[in-house]
Image (spheres, rainbow, N blue to C red):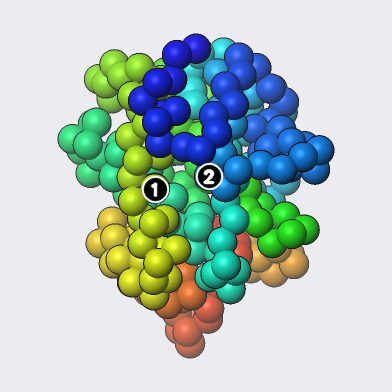
Amino acid sequence: MSLTQTAALVNELISLDSIDSTNLELARRLQSGTLANFSLVVAREQTAGMGRLGRTWVSEPNTSISASLYLKSSHTKELGWATLIMATAIRSAVAELVGDEVLVKWPNDVLVAGKKISGILAQIQPDQSLILGFGINLKTQSGAPETATALDLLGVDADFDTVLSMVVRNFRIRWAIFEQHPATAIQKARGELVEHSATLGKSVRAELPGGGEVYGIAKDIDTEGRLVIHTPEPVVVSAADVWHLRN
């Protein structure tokens, strides 16, 4: 596929028709050789994609973007913000396309009218580099859940390269700031997340990786990117599957 707009924005572009997982493919290439920082693997079909907490992210042929960025940064302590920075980049690109309110569900989903159009999965590598995977629904998939949406359902007929390049461009601008001054990038991202949050102010149930649960009101995103839930005492959650509850 022709990805001329996207190719101009990355240091190496690896374009595939089909792959098990773009995150896995990028990890394999990293293990077998040297990758340029800001390399991108992208596929039109993903047969065994990975979601958060062991879920799958499968994309049917030519219906969605499956992509993974390779990032190496000296700011390893702040790398947890990469997922949230990507969420703001995707949110901004989708909002430009659809013209409707587009929100971020903490920590890694982008929603339009309450339905998921994009998800993100970050994986730290042994050398402390980062593989940052993301998917964007372009067209309706036959096996899609009722909680999902796609650009075509929203009246947008945008080609693969246009959408991908918009996301990569938005992210690259934010990431350049992060590389030069992490505190500034984090402050900017936190401001965007608070302004465009689908989670803050909602009654939530947070399922923790260890198996526990926290119920309360999502009140804030702190300077480390963690969700602050009032239970009524404040509880800080750094990693969780968050469910919005009906008030």
Q: Is mark 1 on a helix, strand or loop?
A: helix
Q: Which residue is drawn at 44% across and 50% down?
A: 86
Drawn side of residue 221 relative to residue 73, left or right:
left
Instruction: State the residue in front, 162 or 49.
Output: 162
Identify the mark nearer the N-term, 1 or 2.
Answer: 2
Q: Which residue is drawn at 80% across and 43% down?
A: 31
Q: What residue type is labelled 1?
A: Arg
How much space separates mark 1 and mark 2, taking CA atoms?
A: 9 Å
Instruction: State the residue in front, 16 or 154.
Output: 16
Q: Residue 149 appears in which quarter of the rendering?
A: top left
Residue 239 image offset from top left, x and y in percent: 60, 65
Question: Would you place residue 210 above or below residue 22 in this image?
Answer: below
Q: Which residue lies furthest to the bottom in this view?
A: 233
Q: Residue 200 appears in which quarter of the rendering?
A: bottom left
Q: Which of the numbered marks, if any, corresponds to residue 183?
A: none
Label 1 sits on residue: 172
Question: Would you place residue 43 above or below residue 221 in this image?
Answer: above
Q: Which residue is drawn at 53% across and 24% down?
A: 144
Q: What residue type is labelled 2?
A: Phe
Residue 135 image offset from top left, x and y in percent: 51, 34
